[in-house]
Image (tube, coloured by chain):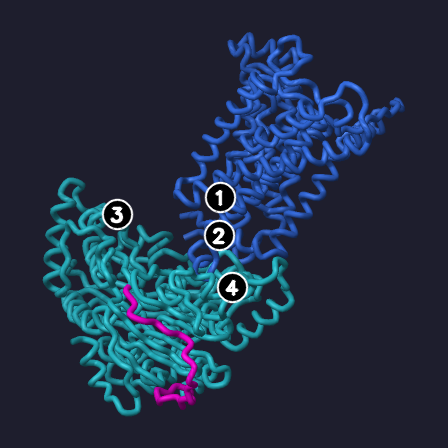
């Protein structure tokens, strides 16, 4: 008789984590292609759209946002604090940015460079504080009332949505928006993107590379912030005593207490740091890309706060893998979008009676990747042996 | 119990752990029905690992388990239970919120689902009477004492149809009187054809109850002795080889205690886990360079007293001062900052963080002042502790969860001893350590008191330990403290009398 037995590896599998991610990716894409093929979409078309999205410069923006947010959540997750409130922290971070740039220091003309710098810097700092505070509220509720952080952060997301919606309908409503329910545009003087024109060369490979470079320059400030966040998070967990406490909190809070630390303070601080990083990204996103808020706010971003949960989860809380998983998730979301807007796909879906469900299909793909991944991740820790008896 | 005679053979069992630690190397062992076997060995010798393999918690790399000529394939505890092999460990695995009867009914495949409760109630009543430990089936588990919980565990094992009962230090921490009752009961289980394997580090007890003693040393069987052949010296030699001569229970030379009190408690009232006072008006004073030992049967308020002193438990009434500074209800952080080491009860739960490595476990206690950690300094300290306490680990970078129970305890003890600059508060400081390490730890404690003038207050259920280590002895009984007594002039019998009176 042949039996399969599962054993814990005595040594972790070399490159086990990367292998797991790659396998999960392949399996998820295969499943997605298969489902669409059943409906009548040519598998080759699906493959080509997905592969194209992985080498498309269009993912740069989402990649940066998701990496930063992924790190924000990683900080909390390492302490077993399940912060799923990045959405709320993101929008709370947006509040001071809109207030400073479109109300207090609003301008239609030009301002001194000093004022530009001060307003931008002030917006960013306040956004970090607001995001951090929103996170700390969840942390304090968990620490002092003992309520589980998952429902708390989730509820705070909705509180944030509606608070910001009220602000947009009320005091933040723009003066130059022709009655639309939105804020004024952030004046050019406070915008944070770098304008650049690169002439096409005619060579597709070079042009492809150039388009990456262009995106990286446009979001140059974001790239800088990203580099700072990576360094800071790495330093936090490897060199600082608070970072160590967060790790111990994630493994055994009882020992943290015995060692003489206040678990409540560590919990609140962790949430504040996590929310603060989200706030930073929020400020950059508004100043560099979104430029205004619009009612209803829930539909303004691509659900970055929730996608970031997938990024952090897929990274196995490994600092080096967060960018990898962020790249995968952003490529896949973009693939889903291109897929759903491709006329062949639209037609096939309509014929099969799924008209209008295009975007939902990408969630099937992301979902199946995460599912296979969750199943496969045990391979890096366990081995399967075949024995004959 | 089936009428069939049991014969269990473990053959050539080998097990390697993550990090390459070889826990067992070609270990073979036999067990028959009607037999009581004690499995002994120093920390990390592989006792628990071997039994966990038999119970399906670990899978062996190599080797087989043969029950009555049938080769068993045990991959998980339910496989073992189906074959009548059940293990009870030192920490109860019960669900606190449920009643005794509900806990007993959980996971019983061979009890009729509807009849479960009444069967369970009947059995627990019967065994509670037999063993002589009072339990009612409708008691909530959280309200039980440790002894009662362990009885529930054993009854559960019997309800699961255990023919081979493995007790991994399951009785070690019970008060002597109650432990004896359990042993009487286990002898009856044995006479009815059952087999018992007991893992313990208390050799005299093993000699008293076991028919056969199997000794493991560094992952191999170093010898087997029948009841008649076995003696304390022989067992120790098999366990520790030449190092056995280091074992001593002679009183360690005392130090001259200073005049300055370090730990001082006055009329302390502290609540236990269930809202009643566990410490009732205790006053105690430990001076510089003094080692004070509290003797007592477990559950008489020693744990609550020590936890209150370190700041883990609220003080209802009374004052605690450390080095003259009032620290009453100021929290653990304040007391720790003053350089007080603490060895907690249940060290594996409260004393280490299993997913972190040894260095991190040490740094989180030692690193208090600056925000940035000096890892070089911590690494030096870690290596020092690993060396002094002979901790078996592939390196200081491995998560501590791969260490054996005894080695984990060494991490806790080593760290806390090093941390004690002014005082050490310890609950069973040598629990789970083998005799050689235990003696070594006591020597280090004594040396620290003598050379670094720290004040030591410890509680121990082991009266020999209290006598070997203490300059001053106290006895705790029903939340009240008696003493101080001088170990030189006070007879053990007098102390024992105070413990149970």
Residue carrying label 4: B365
User: Does residue A126 appear left or right of residue B128 in this picture?
Assistant: right
How far is the residue under mark 3 from the one under mark 2? Answer: 25 Å
Residue A249 numbered tag: 2
Residue carrying label 1: A81
How far is the residue under mark 4 from the one under mark 3? Answer: 33 Å
Discs 1 and 4 share one subunit: no
Q: Earlier in the sequence, mark 2 or mark 1?
A: 1
How far is the residue under mark 2 from the one under mark 1? Answer: 9 Å
Identify the residue at image location x=27%, y=60%. Answer: B272
Discs 1 and 3 share one subunit: no
How far is the residue under mark 1 from the one under mark 3? Answer: 25 Å
Subunit bearing disc 1: A
Subunit bearing disc 4: B
Quarter holding residue B213: bottom left
Question: Among the chains, which one is blue?
Answer: A
Residue carrying label 3: B97
Identify the residue at image location x=30%, y=79%. Answer: B203
Q: Nearer the viewer, residue A212 or A203?
A: A212
Subunit bearing disc 3: B
- Range drawn in magenta: B246-269
Where is residue A82 drawn, in percent x and y?
49, 40
Residues under numbered marks 2 and 1 in contact, where contact means CB atoms less than 8 Å apart? yes
Quarter holding residue B54: bottom left
């Amino acid at each position: 008789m042949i039996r399969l037995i599962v054993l814990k590896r005595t040594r972790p599998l070399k490159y086990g984590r990367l292998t797991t991610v790659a396998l999960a990716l392949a399996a998820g894409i295969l499943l997605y292609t298969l489902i669409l093929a059943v409906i009548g979409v040519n598998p080759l078309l699906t493959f080509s759209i997905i592969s194209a999205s992985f080498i498309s410069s269009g993912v740069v923006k989402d990649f940066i946002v998701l990496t930063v947010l992924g790190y924000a959540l990683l900080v909390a997750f390492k302490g077993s604090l399940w912060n799923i409130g990045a959405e709320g922290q993101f929008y709370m971070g947006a509040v001071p940015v809109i207030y400073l740039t479109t109300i207090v220091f609003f301008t239609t003309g030009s301002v001194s460079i000093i004022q530009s710098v001060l307003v931008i810097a002030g917006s960013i700092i306040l956004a970090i504080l607001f995001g951090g505070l929103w996170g700390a509220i969840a942390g304090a509720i968990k620490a002092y009332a003992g309520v589980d952080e998952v429902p708390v952060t989730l509820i705070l997301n909705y509180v944030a949505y509606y608070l910001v919606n009220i602000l947009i309908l009320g005091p933040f409503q723009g003066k130059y928006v022709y009655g639309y329910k939105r804020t004024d545009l952030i004046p050019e003087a406070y915008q944070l993107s770098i304008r650049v024109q690169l002439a096409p060369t005619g060579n597709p490979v070079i042009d492809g590379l150039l388009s990456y470079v262009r995106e990286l320059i446009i979001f140059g400030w974001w790239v800088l912030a990203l580099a700072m966040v990576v360094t800071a998070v790495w330093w936090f967990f490897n060199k600082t005593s608070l970072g160590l406490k967060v790790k111990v909190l994630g493994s055994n809070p009882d020992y943290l207490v015995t060692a003489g630390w206040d678990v409540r303070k560590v919990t609140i601080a962790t949430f504040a740091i996590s929310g603060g990083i989200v706030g930073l990204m929020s400020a950059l996103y508004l100043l560099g890309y979104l430029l205004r808020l619009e009612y209803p706010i829930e539909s303004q971003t691509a659900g970055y706060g929730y996608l970031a949960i997938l990024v952090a989860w897929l990274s196995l809380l490994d600092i080096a893998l967060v960018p990898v998983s962020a790249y995968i998730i952003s490529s896949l979301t973009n693939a889903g979008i291109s897929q759903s807007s491709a006329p062949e796909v639209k037609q096939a879906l309509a014929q099969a009676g799924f008209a209008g469900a295009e975007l939902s299909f990408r969630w099937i793909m992301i979902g199946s990747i995460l599912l296979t991944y969750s199943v496969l991740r045990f391979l890096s820790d366990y081995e399967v042996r075949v024995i004959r008896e | 119990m089936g009428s069939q005679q049991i014969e269990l053979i473990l053959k050539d069992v080998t097990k390697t752990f993550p990090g390459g630690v070889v826990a067992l190397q070609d270990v073979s062992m036999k067990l028959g029905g009607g037999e009581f076997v004690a499995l002994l060995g120093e920390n990390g010798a592989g006792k628990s690992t071997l039994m966990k393999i038999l119970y399906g918690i670990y899978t062996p790399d190599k080797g087989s388990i043969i029950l009555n000529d049938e080769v068993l394939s045990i991959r998980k505890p339910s496989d073992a239970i189906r074959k009548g092999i059940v293990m009870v460990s030192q920490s109860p695995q019960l669900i606190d919120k449920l009643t005794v009867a509900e806990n007993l009914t959980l996971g019983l495949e061979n009890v009729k689902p509807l009849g479960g409760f009444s069967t369970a109630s009947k059995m627990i009543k019967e065994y509670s009477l037999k063993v002589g430990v009072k339990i009612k089936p409708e008691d909530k588990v959280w309200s039980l004492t440790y002894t009662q919980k362990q009885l529930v565990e054993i009854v559960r094992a019997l309800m699961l149809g255990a023919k081979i009962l493995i007790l991994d230090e399951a009785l070690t921490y019970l008060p002597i009187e109650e432990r004896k009752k359990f042993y009487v009961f286990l002898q009856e289980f044995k006479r009815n054809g059952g087999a018992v394997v007991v893992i313990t580090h208390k050799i005299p007890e093993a000699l008293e109850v076991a028919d056969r003693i199997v000794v493991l040393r560094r992952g191999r069987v170093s010898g087997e002795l029948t009841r008649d052949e076995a003696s304390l010296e022989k067992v120790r030699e098999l366990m520790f080889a030449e190092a056995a001569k280091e074992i001593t229970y002679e009183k360690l030379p005392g130090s001259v205690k200073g005049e300055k009190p370090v730990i001082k408690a006055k009329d302390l009232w502290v609540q236990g886990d269930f809202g009643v006072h566990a410490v009732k008006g205790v006053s105690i004073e430990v001076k510089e360079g003094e080692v004070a030992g509290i003797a007592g049967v477990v559950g008489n308020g020693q744990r609550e007293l020590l936890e209150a002193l370190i700041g883990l438990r609220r003080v209802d009434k009374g004052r605690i001062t450390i080095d003259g500074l009032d620290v009453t209800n100021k929290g653990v952080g304040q007391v720790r900052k003053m350089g007080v080491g603490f060895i907690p009860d249940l060290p594996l739960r409260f004393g280490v963080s299993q997913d972190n490595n040894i260095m991190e476990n040490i740094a989180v206690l030692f690193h208090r002042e600056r925000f940035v950690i000096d890892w070089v300094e911590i690494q030096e300290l870690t290596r020092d502790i690993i060396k002094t306490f002979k901790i078996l680990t592939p390196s200081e970078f491995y998560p501590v969860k791969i260490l054996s129970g005894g080695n984990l305890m060494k991490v806790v003890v080593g760290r806390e001893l090093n941390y004690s600059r002014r005082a050490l508060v310890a609950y069973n400081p040598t629990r789970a350590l083998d005799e050689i390490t235990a003696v070594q730890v006591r020597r280090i404690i004594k040396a620290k008191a003598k050379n670094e003038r720290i004040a030591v207050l410890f509680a121990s259920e082991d009266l020999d330990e209290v006598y070997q280590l203490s300059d001053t002895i106290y006895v705790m009984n029903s939340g009240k403290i008696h003493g101080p007594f001088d170990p030189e002039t006070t007879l053990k019998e007098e102390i024992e009398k105070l413990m149970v009176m």
